Amino acid sequence: MSPFAPILVSLAAAVLILASGRRANLREAWTLAAAAAKFLLVLALLPPALAGRPAEAVLFELSPGVRFALRADALGVSFALLSSGLWILTSVYSIGYMRGLKEHKQTRYFASFAVCLSSAVGIALSANLLTFIVFYEILTIATYPLVIHKEAPAAVRAGRKYLAYTLTAGVVLIAAAAIVWRAAGSLEFTAGGIGGLAGAGAGTIKALFVLFLAGVGVKASVMPLHGWLPTAMIAPTPVSALLHAVAVVKAGVFGALRVVGFVFGPRLMADHGLNMVLAVFAGATIVLASLLAFKQDNLKRRLAYSTVGHLSYIVLGAALLAPTAYAGAVLHMAFHATMKITLFFCAGAIYVRLHRENISQLDGVGRIMPWTMGAFALGAVGLAGLPPLDGFISKWYLGLGAAEAGRTAAILLLVGSGLLNAGYFFPILQRAFFRPAKEKVEGKGDASPLLVVPLAATAALSLILGLWPDLGARFMTLAKTAAAAVFGGGP
Amino acid sequence: MGILNNSPALPVLILLPAAILIPLAGLVRERLAYHLAVLSTGLAAAVSALNLAKVLEGGAIHYWLGGWFPPIGIEYVLDHLSAFIVLVVNVIAFLVILHSRVLVAREIPAPGKHVPYYAVALLMLCGFNGILVTGDFFNLYVWLEISSLALYGLVAVGGKKSAVAAFRYLIMGTIGASFYLIGLAFLFTSTGTLNMADMKAVFPHIAGQPAAAVGLVLMVVGFGLKMALFPLHGWLPDAYTQAPSSSSALIAPVGTKVAAYVLFRLLFFVFVPEEAGRGLPVAQAVGWLSAAGIIFGSVMAIAQKEMKRMLAYSSIAQIGYIGLGIGLANSFGFIGAVLHVMNHAVMKALLFLTAGHFRMRLGHSRIPELDETARRRMPWTTAAFSVGALSMVGLPPAVGFFSKWYLALGTIDRSNWIFLGVILASSLLNAVYFFRVIERLYLVKSGPKDGESESAVSEAPASMLLPVLLLAAAIIVLGLLNAFVVKGVLQAAVPPGMT
């Protein structure tokens, strides 16, 4: 199976969606069909990746010596499975959400969504830095129509801010790639680091590190580059879910994992002390983002700051330079997605059903929307890192990795951050379940099944992956394979 | 085929008679002028493609006009560089001429002016082709004058304001041409030849003389002016803005590129500037001026309210990319610069043509007055504009990204971090002024008087849409396949001895 197939299927879907804009049911059928097909096509890449013989595809040269090439290795397949799998649920949810609110310009919305997913899987499977940049920039542009979807002045401002951050990051990344090409003579992602880079001077390496940190740090929203993310919360909720859990920010942290493991490599990182710099940025982000989350009354903004913190778990896992920590980071990339998407889905369902956005309005909501708030509770418990949810598993591995690397500070950070997570999530649950409702609500029951089924499914997924982390998509094995490749095959 | 033996001269030999035939054909039927123009530019483009194929196969083609050998006769040379740029110029010209029928009828309403318009346009293109293929410095001057005089006419035909802009351009253009001629006189008196290859052979012997340095600098300044190299760009914004849209779409993508070609030829093929007396850093000076021009042009573009004027300032910035590549004087810089000749020609042709669509259908192209109406009525035009804009910003896989990529590699090889910063900053400045327009086209709700003109405004006719969509597709396809162009043509075009 060519790794190009899952990219093309959603690109073709985008065209079909645009062509059938007048017939809403047909249009949505394309989305769902493409999502299902895409997931199956990515799933076909799983066995070769696990067997250590990743599927490859080469089209033509993008620049003399650099080919437009894909390689479905364990790390890439992990991200591709996560994004394409969650796209199915997000699509169902999107249909419910967009129709529930009678949103305008749904054709543009669904088409952009499909292009986003194409580029996310393209990012996952890119075999070299230039191919990666091509998809990375397409993702930037395809997300823009989603961020400004509401077209209100605030949305337009959020769009500008988003572009200002991400385009600048893209440009910086291009500079980094050009320097790597001239310094190392290769842009191929190589497990353990691009060999030619070892010969570069210390100044070049440090400059490259700063460029890469800025280049992928914006989408990974490492502080102080996170400013666009809370602002972009103006977008419709399924978009926030996409931004946060499925594609955009995950493309950023995925980029960080690639850069640490496949461009610099653990040895070069350690030799130049780059891991410490990265760890300090990540650690500071984890603490600050959690503290800022307390201050947010708007539910989506609180979730946004929570995301900022959790993304830096992944960056921290990469920075620890221990196999177990790297595996934990890859796992957290996938598992954080299942939990965070649940929470966003819940926030959206509350908005569609009750038109409430703020946490202070959530008194007694648990009794009106038991399914939604039940799922929310599961997601919140998982993000706090408690068993039996998948958030516990990934965090456990991160902690083990920190111990392996002998970084007590990192362990304390993870424990402390878990407490902070509990601190800003549990009051929401307390309001929802244990306080009486302040105002009468018209109608009865939870939100529409199109909304409740996906969020229940992602919550169930978080639970199942917490109990059997290697089930189905084999995230655990993929993570360990990726870590073994990076640390076993080093130069 | 016997006729193909004359191949370097063929585009000229097609366009010049056509330019003369058009007024005659116009006497029979006015519409014939357009058809003849399309036919001849199409033919010229096809011949240029064949020529490039021949050059790729067998190397440079030399042709001696009238069988007179240099240094007495005039030599025409097609090598990789000239064959490539000739093809770019003729293909773009063909598409723009193809597009022009409705727009010319609309923007030049005076009866009887279409026929001379096409005649003059072909004369200008003929001049461009001549400059590109000639191997003789004085012949180059002749073609320069032919193309320039025709160009002033194409600008002036737009109306009262355009006549002023054209007059200004005429004065400055003539000064530029005079610089070139005086510079050439210096070199001629020192070397005794006008033939480029001869000049190259003789030059090392006179390299130390002040006359050589003065001559070279004067020639570079002359063409720097024609190329709108900052700060010699003063003529450009008015000329591009006031000219009819068809003219600006014809002049902007190719006109300045031809001048840039002459700089390539002068600085890298005929003279080695470092030899031209006391290590004169001519190419480096061009590079630094261009870097300043990139920033200046981009900032000025942000300040513009009229779309065509914005595109004009953007051209000054984009010309800077080519100059920057010249300044780098290494192979990546050269490849980036020559690739950008093609890339920018495709992008700017597309953008000026779509600006023409807006002018025709909305009656204006003032950015603050654009809104959703444009997008609703002209979805294809707007989409094509957006593709061009994203490419100008330099987002992969559009062509605009790859010029920047090669130029960036060139700056790294020179360790010139300021140039690298300029290239990257320019991307972001481009984003500012293009997203400003895209935002209006897609997001600004149309005003209350929208209803009355509902039926009046609709998508541009197919004859205009087809070239625009072709150009938009070319932006993506040429971007993805740029390595074929670079490896197949440009790497062979890199001047000998350049690394």
Image (cartoon, coloured by chain):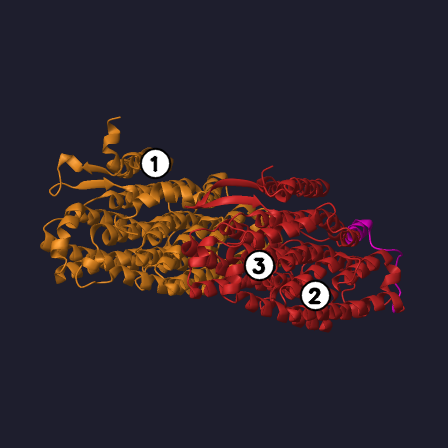
Chain colours: A red, B orange
Badge 3 vs badge 2, beta-carbon distance below 8 Å: no
Pointer 3 indicates a residue of which chain? A
Residue holding disc 3 = A256
* Residue B263 on image: x %, y %: 27, 53
Which residues are the magenta region? A437-459
Left or right of A479, for residue B88: left
> Mark 3, residues whose alpha carbon is within 10 Å: few (<14), some, or many (≥20)?
many
Say if the magenta span includes residue B171.
no
Pointer 2 indicates a residue of which chain? A
Q: What amino acid is found at the position of numbered circle 1 in the picture?
A: Ala
* Residue A95 on image: x %, y %: 74, 48
Q: Nearer the viewer, residue B170 or B190?
A: B190
CA separation, marks 1 and 3?
46 Å
* Residue B486 on image: x %, y %: 38, 45
Quadrant that contains the N terminus of chain B: top left
> Mark 1, residues whose alpha carbon is within 10 Å: few (<14), some, or many (≥20)?
some
